[in-house]
Image: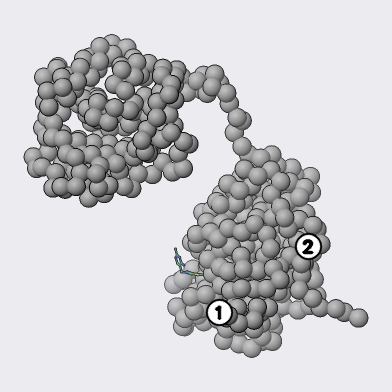
Amino acid sequence: MVKHAKPKGFYDTFDRKTPAGGPASETTHYCPGCGHGTVHKLIAEALADMGIKDRTIFLSPVGCSVFAYYYFDTGNIQCAHGRAPAVGTGVSRSLDDAVVISYQGDGDLAGIGTAEIVHAANRGENMAVFFVNNAIYGMTGGQLAPTTILGQVTTTSPLGRLKDREGGPIHMSEMLDALDGPAYIERCSLADAGRVMKTRKAIRKALSNQVERRGFSFVEILSPCPVGWKTTSTQARNWIKETMESVFEVKTFRDREDMRKGTGRLPIMDDAQLKNLLGADMVDEVRTGTALESIERVKIAGFGGQGVMSAGVLLANAAIAEGLEATWLPSYGPEMRGGTANASVVLSNEPVGSPVVDRPTALLAMNGPSLDGFEDTVVPGGLIIVNSSLIKRKVKRTDVKAIHAPISAMAAEAGFLKGANIVMLALYMLEVGVPGIETLNIVIPKSLKKKEMVNVNLKLVKVAEEFHANG
Ligand SMILES: Cc1ncc(C[n+]2csc(CCOP(=O)(O)OP(=O)(O)O)c2C)c(N)n1
Ligand code: SF4
């Protein structure tokens, strides 16, 4: 007797479809006859049979299977469109024992996410990719996908896909088979029961490859989308067999049983090794017990050549020298010369979660475009320091502290116009108090590669101190 039951890899109930206050649902959100349901079942069964669901991280894509996390009783992450292989890279590199599943449609994987899948495959990342190829964008209403076959009618190719107009279908398995990285590549089909059993085997193979740490496994599954194709379920399965399979050959492309992958992680280094690696930019801790009242998010902005990047590095180094946590993130304008540039520096008592500075607590504006571009982003109560030598207008905001200082003129008067960045940085540090200005005086000699520049830069710190004391 064949007993049909819900695989143990699934949750008991699918809450997505449970009506408010109503009975728990056991149905999915997929259309009748959709291949996603079949692939889900095969994966859920395998996870339960292999006893690996507790160490599995399932990456849901964007597409009809966006809600996969409502079904799989695993760790779940919902990824931005096409980015699952990048997320999976992070997961598998940080969790040695994880079985990472990247579940993706053809729009997700072969359209918006082409770069991510190619590079993850090339690096041979530890993950099993299940690529559900239904030759169409199902979720958004049946538009042409990268894998739509020639002549296929979709809502955006009403006359049928034409090679000269839309290009031919992309064969992802063949493309990835050109790379050295993958361990296992197989194309399967859901056209009939026999083929479903072969897909079942391929899915288990890809998952056991994860357990064995063989690296990157890729299973492409030709899958019916009766709603997008405007067919019955039977017609859809026949179409796969008779038409799709003649374009996408069902076969094993490679199976490298002997492959083994490491974690791909950098070695963990102690301070001495790090210092050796980073050289002069590392500064010994000079003061301990420093604490910030709250996270400082600093945007130092100007045009290329004004030294905004090096001011950012100095600030981050000064903070680290005082035992704080700091990040520095450069952003270069598109022009090679004369363009705008800015450095984002985050200072914190705790490890920094994100180096991005969208809402600065302080803006150090070296030129007009920087003030125009970032003034509105500063948090209320924040600080804006304006280089009034080059910026002729005043700060408009009334809910921030504004300091207008002739930064460039002060640097020029001290004999070193290019050191305006140091005057600006010193002024900021004097204003905020943490890290302390004396730390900047220690960091400057350690950080400057041209030792003959040390004294002039220290002189610029003094210039800023005088301005601050008088103003
Ligand atoms: C950044 C972004 N761009 C576009 C979309 C719209 N969008 C949602 S699903 C989808 C395509 C999904 O197609 P596929 O990956 O083939 O999955 P299927 O729905 O067929 O299973 C697109 C373009 C989006 N959600 N996000
Ligand atoms: S539109 Fe197609 S892929 Fe999406 S759930 Fe319906 S049948 Fe499945």
Q: Residue at x 61, y 73 (%)?
A: 15
Residue 368 visible in the snapshot: yes
Which residue is tagged 1? Answer: 20
Can residue 373 be seen from the camera position used here?
no
Sooner in the amino-acid sequence: mark 2 or mark 1: 1
Q: Which of 279 and 76 is in front in this view?
A: 76
Q: What residue type is labelled 1?
A: Ala
Q: Is residue 288 above or below residue 164?
A: above
Of the pair 79 and 255, the residue shown nearer to us:
79
Side (left or right) of 446 relative to 453 = right
Q: How is the image coloured?
A: one colour
Which quarter of the figure has residue 33?
A: bottom right
**Few, some or many C-alpha atoms within 10 Å of disc 1 (few <14, some 14-19, many ≥20)?**
few
Amino acid type for the residue under numbered disc 2: Ala
Quarter of the view holding residue 10: bottom right
Mark 2 neighbour class, 10 Å CA radius: few under 14, some 14 to 19, many 20 or more: some
Q: Position of residue 133 (x, y in %)?
A: 61, 69
Q: Nearer the viewer, residue 333 or 235?
A: 333
Q: Name the residue under label 2.
A: 48
Q: Is mark 1 on a helix, strand or loop?
A: loop
Q: How many marks?
A: 2
Q: Residue at x 46, y 42 (%)?
A: 353
